[in-house]
Image (spheres, rainbow, N blue to C red):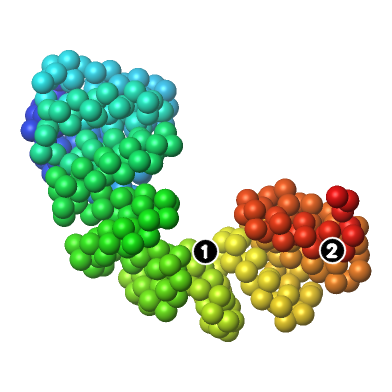
C-alpha cells in the first residue's frame, strides 16, 4: 500500500473530505495510481460529500464503468470496511459504492449502519432518501430528507431534494418553503430559482413564476429547459411573441431540444403557416422520433389539407407516444366528433 493510499484511507475514516480529495489526486499522479479506479472513486466520494455533483458524475464514469473497475473498487471498499467496522464513514463509503454500481437495494443496510454510528451526520439520511426514491417509496424518502435537514439545516442539497419530493406529491407550499430556504443559503443557485418558479406556476402564480425563471436565467443563461419553461408560461398568458422568443432562446442554448421545435411548430400552426409549421415539426422529429406533440401537429396539418389517411397515421403515432391522458383524450374526442374512429 502506497503512502497516498494510506493517507486517503485515513482521511476517509476521519471524514475529512477535503483531505480525501487532495490525497486521491496525489494517488492518481503516481505511476501505479494512474490507471487505478480506486483513487478516482475516492475523489467521486469527496465530490458527492462536498455537493459537487456534476464533478462526481464525471468521476463516476471513469471509475465504475467496467465490471473490472467495479470489482477492484468493491474489493478495496470491502477491505476498508473490514478493517474499520466500527467507523460510520466506512459504512457510508460502502453504501455509496453499492448505490453507484447497480446494487442500490444492498446499500440500505450500510447507510442505516452509518446513520447509527454517525448520529449527528446528515449524509447517511440524505443518500438513503435517494435509494427510497429510486425504489418508489416517496414517504420514506421524505422522512429521510427531513431527518437530514433536521441534523443540518444549512445542507442545501437535502432541502432541494426535499422540496422536489414534496412537489411530486403536490404539496406545493411545503416545496416552495424548501426552495426559498435553499435560495437563502445559496442565492446564486439557478436550479433553486427554476424549481421555485415551477412550483409557483403549478400554484397558478404565473407572474412570480416568470420572475423566478428570469432570475434563474440571469444566473445560467444557457439553461435550455428554463428558457422552454418560461416560454410555456408566456404562451399560457397569451404572450405569444415572448413565448416564441423564449422557445428560440432554448434552441440557441441547445439546438437539439426537440420540445422547443415542437412548441414553435404549434405557434406557426396557430398562424396558419402550414408549410413553416410542417418544416419545424420535421426538425422536432429529427431530435426525437417519439415526439408526440410533433406527430400531433403534423396530423393537424394533414387534416387541414384534407389528407385524411396521412392525418390518421400521424394521430395514431401521437396517441402512441403521448403520456399525458389529457392530450390523448383531446385527440380521441376530436376523432369521435369527426367520425374517424368507431366506438
Q: Is residue 155 above or below residue 147?
A: below
Q: Earlier in the sequence, mark 1 or mark 2?
A: 1
The picture places residue 89, in percent across and down from the top left corner, at: 15, 30
- Quadrant in which residue 20 is drawn: top left
Can I make out residue 319 in this image?
Answer: yes
Where residue 137 sits: x, y (%)? 39, 37
Instruction: Please indicate whether residue 289 sits to the left or right of residue 86 in the image.
Output: right
Secondary element at tag 1: loop
Say which residue label 2 marks: 337
Q: Residue at x 48, y 63 (%)?
A: 225
Q: Is residue 139 above or below residue 341?
A: above
The image shows residue 53 at horizontal and vertical percentages of: 30, 48
The answer to which of 10 and 93 lies nearer the viewer is 93
Q: Residue at x 35, y 20 (%)?
A: 71
Q: Residue 319 placed where, x, y %?
A: 73, 52
Q: Which residue is mark 1?
A: 254
Report the quarter where the N terminus lies. top left
Amino acid at each position: 500500500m502506497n503512502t497516498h493510499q494510506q493517507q486517503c484511507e485515513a482521511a476517509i475514516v476521519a471524514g475529512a473530505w477535503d483531505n480525501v480529495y487532495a490525497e486521491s489526486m496525489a494517488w492518481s499522479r503516481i505511476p501505479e495510481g494512474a490507471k487505478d479506479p480506486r483513487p478516482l472513486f475516492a475523489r467521486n466520494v469527496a465530490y458527492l460529500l462536498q455537493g459537487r455533483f456534476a464533478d462526481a458524475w464525471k468521476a463516476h464514469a471513469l471509475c465504475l464503468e467496467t465490471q473490472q473497475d467495479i470489482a477492484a473498487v468493491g474489493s478495496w471498499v470491502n477491505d476498508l470496511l473490514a478493517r474499520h467496522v466500527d467507523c460510520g464513514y466506512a459504512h457510508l463509503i460502502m453504501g455509496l459504492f453499492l448505490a453507484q454500481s447497480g446494487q442500490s437495494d444492498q446499500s440500505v443496510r450500510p447507510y442505516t449502519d452509518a446513520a447509527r454510528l454517525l448520529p449527528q451526520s446528515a449524509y447517511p439520511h440524505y443518500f438513503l432518501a435517494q435509494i427510497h426514491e429510486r425504489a418508489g417509496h416517496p414517504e420514506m424518502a421524505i422522512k429521510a430528507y427531513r431527518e437530514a435537514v433536521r441534523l443540518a439545516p444549512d445542507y442545501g442539497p437535502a432541502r432541494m431534494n426535499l422540496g422536489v419530493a414534496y412537489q411530486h406529491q403536490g404539496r406545493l407550499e411545503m416545496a416552495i418553503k424548501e426552495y426559498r430556504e435553499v435560495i437563502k443559503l445559496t442565492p446564486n443557485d439557478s436550479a433553486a430559482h427554476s424549481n421555485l418558479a415551477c412550483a409557483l406556476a403549478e400554484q397558478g402564480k404565473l407572474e412570480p413564476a416568470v420572475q423566478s425563471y428570469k432570475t434563474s436565467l440571469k444566473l445560467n443563461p444557457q439553461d435550455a429547459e428554463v428558457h422552454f419553461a418560461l416560454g410555456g408560461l408566456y404562451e399560457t398568458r397569451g404572450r405569444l411573441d415572448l413565448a416564441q422568443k423564449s422557445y428560440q432562446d432554448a434552441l440557441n442554448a441547445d439546438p437539439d431540444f426537440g420540445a422547443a421545435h415542437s412548441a414553435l411548430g404549434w405557434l406557426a400552426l396557430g398562424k396558419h403557416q402550414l408549410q413553416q409549421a410542417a418544416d419545424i415539426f420535421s426538425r422536432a422529429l429529427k431530435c426525437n422520433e417519439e415526439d408526440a406533440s410533433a406527430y400531433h401537429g403534423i396530423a393537424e396539418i394533414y387534416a387541414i389539407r384534407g389528407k385524411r389517411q396521412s392525418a390518421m397515421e400521424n394521430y395514431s403515432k401521437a396517441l402512441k407516444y403521448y403520456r399525458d391522458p389529457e392530450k390523448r383524450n383531446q385527440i380521441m374526442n376530436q376523432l369521435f366528433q369527426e367520425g374517424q374512429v368507431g366506438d
